[in-house]
Image (cartoon, helix red, strand yellow):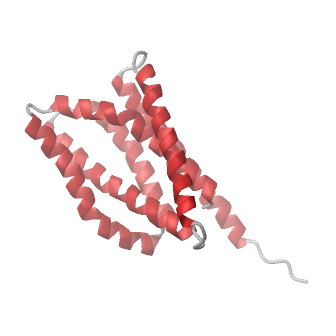
Amino acid sequence: MNDRTFVTSQSLLMTASSMVFPFYLLLIRNIGDSYSQFGLAYGLFALTGALAHPVIGRLSDKIGDRTLLLLYTWGMAGMMLVVPIIETVSALYALQIVMGVLGAVQKTTEKTALSRQSSGKQIGRKIGNYHLWTSVWGAAAVIATGYLIDFLTIGSLFYLASLLYVISAVILMKSASIESVKETKKPVQT
């Protein structure tokens, strides 16, 4: 996977997550009866992610970054379809646990992919540019969503985010097939 593919895919998923995050917080707050349930739900997300990071780091070394990024994008696409229909606190807790693991997959794999793509020269510059573009798309998503929400339901916003995750996954899958074609070409013999 080349730099441009990686940044494009990550920018799309950052757009999707930034677009729904403020509304997701409102949604999970409205499901429970108290702020303690909200706190527990968000805490489950954070704790599950923290516990998953070491396992995901080892998996990244064994099965590769692209596989984990695909797991994340397809997983989040599915989660975004489930979010609007969550009605119980127990379902919310289960969703938070799954999303905690998926969030850890993204965070860890983003860093391992960046480090593997770096040749040791100007790594800071590369990481800075990566964060510039993913953050710009995230900010644009938050601003645009503020205007779009007047015309859409919150549920449709999650469906749109799911579509963006799917597009990100397709970009990653397409890059995999392009790279495998490049790897299978035989060198020209003279």
Res. 165 visible in picture: no
| Pick the front one: 68 or 45 | 45
Q: Quadrant of the N terminus?
A: bottom right
Q: Position of residue 181 (x, y in %)?
A: 70, 65
Q: Position of residue 152 (x, y in %)?
A: 41, 19
Extreme residue in the bottom direction: 190
| Pick the front one: 138 or 23 | 138
Query: Does residue 87 appear to the left or right of 150 in the view shown?
Result: left
Q: Quadrant of the C terminus?
A: bottom right
Res. 72 visible in picture: yes
In this rendering, the answer to whether 158 lies above or below 134 is above
Query: Does residue 50 appear to the left or right of 128 in the view shown?
Result: left
Q: Residue at x 27, y 57 (%)?
A: 49
Q: Position of residue 167 (x, y in %)?
A: 54, 43
In this rendering, the answer to whether 99 lies above or below 151 is below
Query: Does residue 49 appear to the left or right of 10 in the view shown?
Result: left
Q: Residue at x 30, y 36 (%)?
A: 83
Q: Position of residue 173 (x, y in %)?
A: 57, 55
Q: Residue at x 35, y 66 (%)?
A: 56
